[in-house]
Amino acid sequence: MRSAVRSPRRDRLVDFTCVTLSLLGTFAMLLDAWDDPGFSRPYLVSGLVLSVAGSLALWRRRERPLLVALLILPVGMYTEMAFGAVLVSMFSLAVHRPWRFAVALTAAHAAGSVPYAVLRPDPELSAGGYGGVGLATFAVVLTILISVPFVAWGMVVRARRELVGSLRERAERAEAEAALRADRIRGREREHIAREMHDALAHRITLVSLHAGALEIRPDMRPDEVAHVAGTIRSSAHQALEDLREILGVLRSGEAVAEGAQPPPATRPQPGVADIAELVGESRAAGASVALVDRLPEAAGSLPASVGRTAYRVVQEGLTNARKHAPGHGARVLLDRTGEGELHVRVDNPLTTGQARPALPGARSGLVGLSERVSLAGGRIDYGARRGEAGAIDFRLEAWLPWPT
């Protein structure tokens, strides 16, 4: 169990006070007994030396409470001048060690007071007719009555410190767990932003690249065609900047994401199934040959936003990969509802042969992020080389998404 954090300066001040009070008590008892004919001078001097040594040993009562108590207890049995040091050592033992040690030494202290009371009986008690048994009983009861409050006080201090330490440890653990949860949330938010950035920007940049490539390989284009291509490049670049600005805004807002918070809402309407036709049109405007087969019923417009957005991203990723890795070849997009009541999205494009590298470089992270997106939407995804309807080898990307009834 962790204890409460202590101030070394305060602890040393308390130690100094305990040692000082113990020494003052020793010298006060010495002065009281100095002229008593019942005590010899050698006994008083030896008791003084042992009591002073016991008081000075209290400096180590925090580090070695049991050892200090075991050293001082015999001195207390030998002379009353060490009684203050004994009480402080018992208190310290109860604070820094389990209660069993303090109770055992309290009993030993009470038992050790019997020989002293019998060998050096109090004159007033002896005059009152107390014999050996009465003197021993009185010494034990008096020692217990004086020692128990100090031991109980030490136990209370120990229990309080353990409670404070436990509460502090619990608070630190809760704070660490909250920080860990916040880190996980920020990590998921960054993954979400990375997927959005890839899905949005990769599509726009490939359109810009294709139109720029058209200007490069066709220097004889008519002015109106050049103007049209340049306008498309400008529009795609502007849309890419808008997408980037929106994503960066989400990123800044995500720095303050708290536990349980959802990603900040987009500033523009999110695309869905109804926007796939426009997406295909953009690819066609860039010169790509894309066939769209839409077999969806009119009820597709009522699909959940997350499902529609995921279907849009599947088509977007498929067309982006087709433009990057198989430029100049056609692509086919199929939208359908399966017999199991699922939304089926498929994008096919021919696999090129003899191509040393793709026309545009890729980080190969789009399909990984798309797989995570489809999984989060409750669907499944499959992609890879497949034999097409005409017997040719195509690259096929398809996903099955839930269609709530």
Image: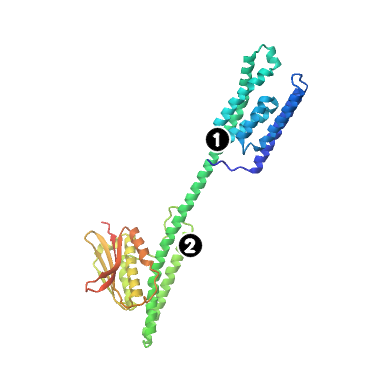
Occupied quadrant, residue 308: bottom left
Q: Nearer the viewer, mark 2 or mark 1?
A: 1
Above or below, 64 relative to 352: above
Q: Which residue is mark 1?
A: 159
* Mark 2 / mark 1, whichever is N-terminal: 1
Q: The residue under label 2 is which amino acid type?
A: Arg
Looking at the rendering, in which quadrant would you find the C terminus? Answer: bottom left
Cα gap from disc 2 to disc 1, whole angstroms: 47 Å
Locate residue 209, reporting x and y percent. 39, 77
Between 253 and 360, the one nearer to me in the picture: 360
What residue lies at 75% left-to-right and 23% top-to-bottom?
33
Q: Say few, some or many: other residues with alpha carbon within 10 Å of mark 2 (under 14 / 14 to 19 / 20 or more).
A: few
| In this picture, residue 380 sits left or right of residue 131 | left
On screen, residue 272 above or below 63: below
Mark 2 lies on residue: 252
Horizontally, residue 299 falls left or right of residue 27, namely left
Vertical side of 141 occupied by 390: above or below: below
The residue at 65%/20% (across/down) is 115
Q: Can residue 123 be seen from the camera position used here?
A: yes
Q: Position of residue 77 (x, y in %)?
A: 66, 25
Is residue 21 among the parts visible in the rendering? no
Percent position of residue 360, x then y: 38, 75
Q: Amino acid at mark 1?
A: Ala
- Which residue is painted at 58% across and 25% down in the image? 107
> Residue 336 is drawn in which quadrant?
bottom left
Q: Residue drawn at (49%, 52%), measured in percent from left and top? A: 179
| Element at label 2 | helix
Q: Which mark is residue 210?
A: none
Hey, which residue is sitting farthest top in the picture?
129
Badge 1: how crowded within 10 Å, few (<14), some, or many (20+)?
A: some
